[in-house]
Image (spheres, helix red, strand yellow):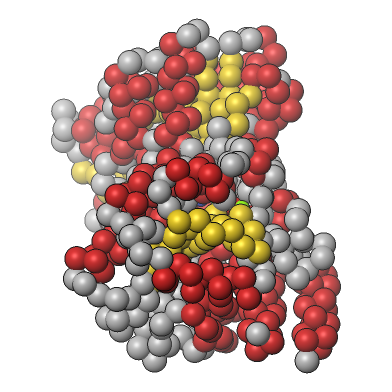
Amino acid sequence: MKELMLTANKIRQDVIEMLVEAGSGHSAGPLGMADVFTALYFNHARINPKKPWDENRDRIVLSNGHICPVWYATLAERGFFPVRELKTLRKINSRLQGHPHARELPGIENSGGPLGQGCNIGVGMALAGKMDKKNWRVYALLSDGELNEGCDWEAFMLAAKYELDNLCFIIDRNNIQIEGPSDKVMPLEPLKKKLESFNLHVIEVNGNDFKQVLNALEKAGKTKGMPTAIIAKTTPGKGVSFMENDYKWHGKPPNKEEAEKALKELRRQRTELL
Amino acid sequence: MILNPKLFEEVEKTPTRDGYGKGVLKAGKTNKNIVVLSADLAESTRSHWFAEAFPKRFIEVGVAEQNMMGAAAGLALSGKIPFVSSYAVFSPGRSWDHLRVAVCYTNANVKIIGAHAGISVGPDGATHQALEDIAITRVLPNLVVEVPCDALEAEKTTLAIIKRKGPCYLRLGREKTPVITTNKTPFKIGKAEVFREGRDVSIIACGSMVYEALLAAQQLAKEGIDCEVVNNHSIKPIDEKTILKTARKTGRVVTAEEHQVFGGMGSAVAEVLAQHPTRIEFVGMLDCFGESGKPSELMAKYKMDSKAIIKAVHKILQ
Ligand SMILES: Cc1ncc(C[n+]2csc(CCOP(=O)(O)OP(=O)(O)O)c2C)c(N)n1
Ligand SMILES: [Mg+2]
């Protein structure tokens, strides 16, 4: 656990450094989801950075593409590509696009940005896995704001219809989006009941608690006959006190001073862990 | 033509989306039927100025562009004048089927605001750079398609599309761009304006490329090449008369737009010029997707700036 927490801390530092260098991009979502990404790539999922496109790998797709800085940082720290390349985020001629471009980088399974598409793509992959009787799994990462889109719910119905137990949706339930708290912009509750009524197996966890996240992933793997949706309640901006739970950090990067402050906090958290 | 006298000096820069925001706010004060819808993008589309002033006539639909377009048709069929606002990639991108049937086939009085159009969106990358929206809107019957060249023209267009009954699409940019026109510059839907008279080559441009065209013309004048520059903001209805007139005058046309060449404004001009076959060079996106980068870097790399226009003029004169 401590190892994972240290990794997530490093990833958060990377995210801050990338964003301040880029001068644009999203802060809150990536910081909030660093633990889920770490749990998947450093513990649970069957992936191999040396063979990023191995036929038998688990597929991890990102539907809320704007949080890709955390995807890039996780992949780099896991060894998919050099960590130093992270600093090219959002710059011209970079492989680190502002929103992900499928297969431009090792490990980037899907193009995304327009919310909801990754959710549909994930279902398609899981259908293919079933057809070919493969035992690799699909993890489709979604966000609460994106659940405003109809296409996500179309995907849930399709996944339930074909009993895609090789598919696990993970919803970043951080209760923020662009224009404010998610529950104000478009109320989603009762989310668990809604998803259950769509015939999904639903698990609610604290998305910033490794034990809970890993347990849920384990349970999802054992569930037969239906897809699982993990509602990961995360703290947007997690780890940087002045960003936490403030929707205004959805879509802006820290400036130099703010980044310094953020890194100081994150470094302190690291020493406290050690 | 009456243009901003400081055009080539320290010209004021404002994004065209601000022009829309100002226009709809102004109109909302007197016209109580105006309603603005947003799909979680009120601030960056500048719909939030209206939302703050008239909270009861503002509807936040959440991240749901299809629903927004359909609901707008319902509002219009019930006497309202709804403005549907989002980024162009999502609306009319994702919402296109609803636009086609619920709005255009119905001939519903819906105004569609496509913000953050073009490659100048910059670092967000290809997913967010609408380079196809002119193509997918100009094929729709009943739909007016307008691409203002600056913030002031965007404001005038906003007011004009309210007066005009029926569906209208307004394409806007994110970046600050020079204010080319003044309050006295004429503006009418369906009427292209000659911004600079010339004899050798006609540069027909829209949106942010109008300024690039004026820059190119100024540069070319130093080489003794006399360019006419036409602001072709009305993609539909297109001003056949002005286009034919300038083509007859110079015999050579360069079109320039921040959009795919296939299906874009240049293609619309070529359709008109099929009546009077003219040599045309197209400046625009050449059948590829964009990428992340600074707006100016991208305009240069993908050849949608004054340099690209100058090159096209040289080529057509060879
Ligand atoms: C189809 C679509 N519409 C609009 C947008 C613009 N947009 C980008 S992020 C976002 C808010 C999404 O909410 P969420 O993912 O919960 O944001 P976060 O928690 O990361 O702040 C919106 C509306 C988009 N990317 N895709
Ligand atoms: Mg959210």
Q: Position of residue B266 (x, y in %)?
A: 30, 40
- The residue shown at (30%, 81%) is A56
Q: Quadrant of residue A5?
A: bottom right
Whether residue A48 is visible to the viewer of this picture, yes or no, is yes
Give how far across and how far down residue B221 sits, in percent.
46, 48
Q: Residue at x 35, y 88 (%)?
A: A51
Picture layout, residue B197 above or below residue B56: below
For the point 30% across and 24% down, the residue is B101
- Quarter of the image with the N terminus of chain A is bottom right
In the rendering, at what x and y percent does residue B178 appear?
61, 43
Q: How many numbered tags mark residues here?
A: 0
Name the residue nearer the viewer: A28 or B273: A28
As drawn, A107 above or below B111? below
Q: Is residue B157 visible?
A: no
Image location (x, y in percent) of residue B154:
56, 30
Q: Is B295 in front, or is A216?
A: A216
Which residue is drawn at the image coordinates 48% and 9% (left, top)? B78
State left or right for residue B132 relative to residue A66. Answer: left
Where, quadrant-wise, is the C terminus of chain A in this rendering?
bottom right
